[in-house]
Each structure stands twice: as structure tokens, then as C-alpha cells.
Amino acid sequence: PIILLNDHYTLGSYPQIGTIASYHLTKLAQKPTGSKLKFQFIDIETAEKNLIKYSNWLNQLFHGIEYRMQLEMLK
């Protein structure tokens, strides 16, 4: 399959057989061309739950970075 990212052109007459969950796009973008990928079907409810988990993790990461930066500024 061909995977189109954010800067893709219009699909034209090509069929769209699936969508990659947005929380996996960062990992996908780092894969070199020709990498082997495993696709798994998930329903919309699972995708939404996983997106919430990913968003919470990202917020914790950003807060942790901000906290560490504040500690460094106090030195």
C-alpha cells in the first residue's frame, strides 16, 4: 500500500482502504522507505480511547520537561 501523510495530493480515483490512527503518525514518519509494517484493524471506539491515552501521555511528558526546565533555571 501507499501511505500518504499530511502533505499528500488528492486521492483522485485511487480507493482509500484505511486510515492510520493519528497517534501512530509520528512513529510512521520516522520509518525508512521500504520498512515492513504491520497493519491491524481497530474500531473507532478503540482508536478514540488510544488517542486519549496518547494525549494524556504527551501532556505528562510536556509537563515533565517543563518541570525539569524550571529546576534548571533555579540553579
Image (cartoon, grey):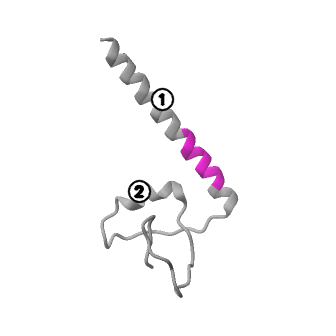
Q: Is residue 33 magenta?
A: no
Specify whether 6 is left or right of 74.
right
Q: Amino acid at mark 1?
A: His
Quadrant of the rendering where the C terminus is positioned: top left
Residue 29 in picture, x, y percent from top left? 38, 60
- Say which quadrant the N terminus sits in: bottom left
Comparing labels 1 and 2, the label whose residue is closer to the camera: 1
Residue 40 has which mark?
none
Q: Residues within 10 Å of mark 1 (few under 14, many from 20)?
A: few
> Residue placed at 41% from the left, 61% from the top?
28
24 on left or right of 74: right
The foreground one among 49 and 26 is: 26
| Image point (55%, 61%), residue name | 21
- Residue at mark 1: 63
- Does 49 appear in magenta? yes
Q: Is residue 71 left or right of residue 17?
A: left
Q: Main secondary structure of the magenta part?
A: helix
Residue 71 at x, y percent in the picture: 37, 17
Quarter where residue 66 is shown: top left
Q: Secondary structure at mark 1?
A: helix
Give the amino acid type for the residue marked by disc 2 in the picture.
Answer: Lys
* Position of 5 relative to 10 (above/below): above
In this view, 12 is above or below 45: below
Highlighted range, magenta:
48-56
Up/down of 71 relative to 16, above or below:
above
> Neighbour class for label 2 at 10 Å: few (<14), some, many (≥20)?
few
Residue at the top extreme of this rendering = 75
Question: Residue 30's image quarter?
Answer: bottom left
User: Residue 60: horizontal and vertical position, in percent?
Assistant: 51, 33
Residue 27: mark: 2
- Residue at (67%, 61%) from the top-left corner? 44
- Which residue occupies 34% across, 69% down? 35
